[in-house]
Image (tube, coloured by chain):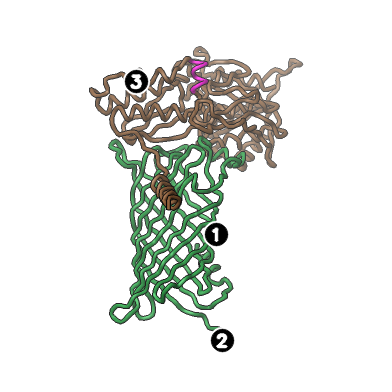
Chain colours: A green, B brown
């Protein structure tokens, strides 16, 4: 992930003005993966979000999370699942300012997600991987307002994968079989019909001396229904971080 | 206006109805029995096969086990009740797990002669045997009369592999085979081996093949129907670029050879210089999966069937090339009649 951040930070710029965001979050998550268990799980997740946005409209974001959940409603024992995943997206959005202090954005992202869920109770099929490559539509709105002599900002953004390719084992397929005899049948088209995914964030940027302190609510809805297997991963996270706007100046 | 309204309603329906979720059964006694029955009904891979071979009617099982007075049971009774329901399948890969017990049906080995005396076997290994990964081995010296009536002295390698969960690597096997370089053959004793990792099974068997050989098939369920299976995936054993043992080998088996050990025997049946001797293997030809009941108990069941090279299911075991059993009288003399038989099979 660090390597991805370094590479993305030095991508060629059409404009040298950029805004970097880094956030850490903690929140609740609900998980179900019928490949591993028919039960629903709930627990907590830690998440990290990094984004760079150029004046030109180019943006790139990296998100990672780790979760720990327990089965809901069981009494005889408390099965546990651990999960983690990383998504990387890059794209461009068009900015429209109907008035000075209001900005709308509309754009497209291309990216990938890779994650794994590990069920501590299972010995024969202990884990399941989730991955996809997708193109997403992204929308956003930002409202700036003066308060106590500084400019505060309220920001909302959301992205929804529209089309792509996802990975899922077949209904009763083992990873042993996949590793030995290939994964044909494990790649399916990703679209609304096999799982509506949505990532959104509402944030308040509080101005400080030369950066914004960002307080945000982020919701990450990942789900898929393919090969008679269902998976959902609904996370709601409170986040805190900072936003810095700066420009690079070349000195010859 | 109407068109716009339709778009909004469609979008809202997509958003609200777009939740991908499956409601588990309620955590009641009835809910748990229902959940367990349905789990097997949708995921277990041998329901049709068990109906044909053992007359297990899983639809009928549901009615019988739900008709019981579940409301009078405590948790221990419920566990036994659920375990009994699973036992109807007579499958060693079908288990129920709680913190207090493991529900099981081990009739595949308990209903048959053991054909293994651990102490007797250990007397052949002695105390100076070598250990390479999960393999215990030593050289057995012997005297025999050859075809011309001459008494000759030679040796046979003896290997005991008790569990396919114990690691073996190509390096380990190379060392063992090199150690046996002057031996006429090898006795590979896997009696009592209840299985483990299929990777170990493939690694070990590969050293006894001369060429890439088709040994069987594997498939998996593609849906909830009893007969929703993928096409058969051929399984091959490819000899490694290491030492290949192309001299006589006798694999000793009994009814406790199960799961990966059963697959090993299936593979070795196709090796050129191998004889399978002993009793029929216990079976376990379905790679298992795990799931959970609403109360939290774990469930294991066969999910991916394995077949032999003729496409026959190997769930109920594999017959040896030569049947032999443990002779109690010889055991009293300190002789393991199965090992002695194996020694005579190596010329």
Please report the bounds of the magenta region as a residue range: B47-54
Q: Residues within 10 Å of mark 3 (few under 14, many from 20)?
A: some
Quarter of image, res B106: top left
Q: Residue at x 40, y 37 (%)?
A: A38
In this rendering, the answer to whether B334 lies above or below A77 is: above
In this rendering, the answer to whether B52 lies above or below B307 is: above
- Which-is-in-front pick, marks 1 and 2? 1
User: Label 2 near label 1: C-beta < 8 Å?
Assistant: no
Q: Position of residue B109 (x, y in %)?
A: 47, 20
Quarter of image, res B229: top right
Label 2 to label 3, Cα distance in Å?
81 Å
Q: Residues within 10 Å of mark 2 (few under 14, many from 20)?
A: few
Judged from the image, the secondary structure of the residue bearing numbered disc 1 is strand
State yes or no: residue A125 in magenta: no
- Which-is-in-front pick, marks 1 and 3? 1
Label 1 to label 3, Cα distance in Å?
52 Å
Q: Residue at x 68, y 24 (%)?
A: B153
Label annotation for residue A110:
1
Q: Which residue is mark 3?
A: B65
In this rendering, position of residue A16 left or right of residue A154? right
Q: Position of residue B222 (x, y in %)?
A: 53, 33
Q: Position of residue B258 (x, y in %)?
A: 51, 26
Label 1 to label 2, Cα distance in Å?
33 Å
Judged from the image, the secondary structure of the residue bearing numbered disc 2 is loop
From the viewer's side, name the closer residue of B191 and A90: A90
What quarter of the picture does the C terminus of chain B occupy? top right
Q: Which residue is mark 2?
A: A251
């Amino acid at each position: 992930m660090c390597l991805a951040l370094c590479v993305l930070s030095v991508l060629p710029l059409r404009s040298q003005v950029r805004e970097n965001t880094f956030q850490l979050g903690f929140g609740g998550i609900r998980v179900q993966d019928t490949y591993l268990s028919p039960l629903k799980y709930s627990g907590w997740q830690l998440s990290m979000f990094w984004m760079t946005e150029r004046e030109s409209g180019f943006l790139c974001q990296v998100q990672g999370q780790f979760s720990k959940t327990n089965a809901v409603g069981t009494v005889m024992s408390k099965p546990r699942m651990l999960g983690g995943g990383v998504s990387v997206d890059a794209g461009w959005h068009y900015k429209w300012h109907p008035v000075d202090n209001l900005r709308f954005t509309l754009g497209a992202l291309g990216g990938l997600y890779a994650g794994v869920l590990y069920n501590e109770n299972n010995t024969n099929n202990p884990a399941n991987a989730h991955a996809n490559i997708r193109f997403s539509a992204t929308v956003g709105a930002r409202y700036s307002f003066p308060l106590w002599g500084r400019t505060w900002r309220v920001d909302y953004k959301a992205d929804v994968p529209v089309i792509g390719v996802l990975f899922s084992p077949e209904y009763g397929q083992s990873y042993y079989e996949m590793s030995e005899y290939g994964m044909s049948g494990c790649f399916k088209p990703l679209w609304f019909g096999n799982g509506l995914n949505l990532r959104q964030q509402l944030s308040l940027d509080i101005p400080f001396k030369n950066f914004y302190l960002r307080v945000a609510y982020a919701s990450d809805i990942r789900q898929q229904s393919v090969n008679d297997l269902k998976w959902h991963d609904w996370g709601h996270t409170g986040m805190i971080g900072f936003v810095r706007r700066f420009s690079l100046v070349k000195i010859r | 206006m109407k068109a716009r309204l339709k778009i909004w309603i469609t979008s809202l329906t997509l958003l609200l109805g777009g939740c991908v979720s499956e409601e588990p059964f309620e955590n009641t006694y009835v809910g748990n029995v229902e959940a367990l029955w349905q789990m097997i009904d949708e995921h277990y891979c041998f329901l049709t096969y068990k109906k044909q071979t053992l007359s297990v009617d899983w639809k009928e099982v549901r009615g019988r086990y739900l008709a019981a007075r579940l409301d009078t049971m405590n948790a221990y009774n419920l566990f036994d009740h659920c375990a009994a329901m699973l036992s109807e399948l007579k499958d060693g890969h079908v288990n129920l797990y709680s913190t207090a017990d493991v529900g099981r049906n081990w009739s595949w080995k308990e209903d048959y002669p053991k054909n293994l005396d651990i102490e007797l076997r250990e007397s052949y290994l002695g105390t100076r045997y070598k250990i390479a990964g999960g393999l215990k081995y030593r050289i057995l010296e012997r005297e025999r009369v050859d075809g011309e009536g001459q008494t000759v002295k030679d040796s046979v390698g003896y290997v005991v592999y008790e569990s396919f969960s114990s690691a073996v690597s190509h390096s380990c096997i190379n060392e063992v085979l090199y150690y046996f370089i002057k031996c006429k053959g090898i006795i590979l004793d896997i009696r009592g081996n209840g299985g483990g990792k299929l990777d170990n099974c493939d690694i070990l068997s590969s050293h006894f093949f001369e060429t890439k050989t088709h040994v069987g098939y594997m498939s998996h369920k593609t849906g909830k129907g009893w007969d929703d299976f993928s096409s058969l995936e051929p399984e091959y054993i490819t000899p490694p670029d290491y030492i290949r043992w192309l001299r006589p080998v006798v694999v000793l088996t009994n009814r406790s050879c199960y799961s990966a050990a059963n697959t090993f025997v299936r593979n070795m049946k196709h090796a050129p210089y191998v004889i399978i001797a002993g009793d029929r293997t216990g079976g376990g030809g379905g790679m298992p999966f795990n799931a959970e009941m609403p109360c939290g108990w774990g469930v294991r069941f066969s999910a991916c069937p394995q077949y032999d090279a003729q496409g026959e299911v190997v769930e109920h075991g594999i017959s040896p090339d030569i049947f032999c059993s443990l002779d109690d009288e010889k055991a009293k003399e300190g002789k393991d009649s199965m090992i002695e038989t194996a020694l005579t099979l190596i010329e």
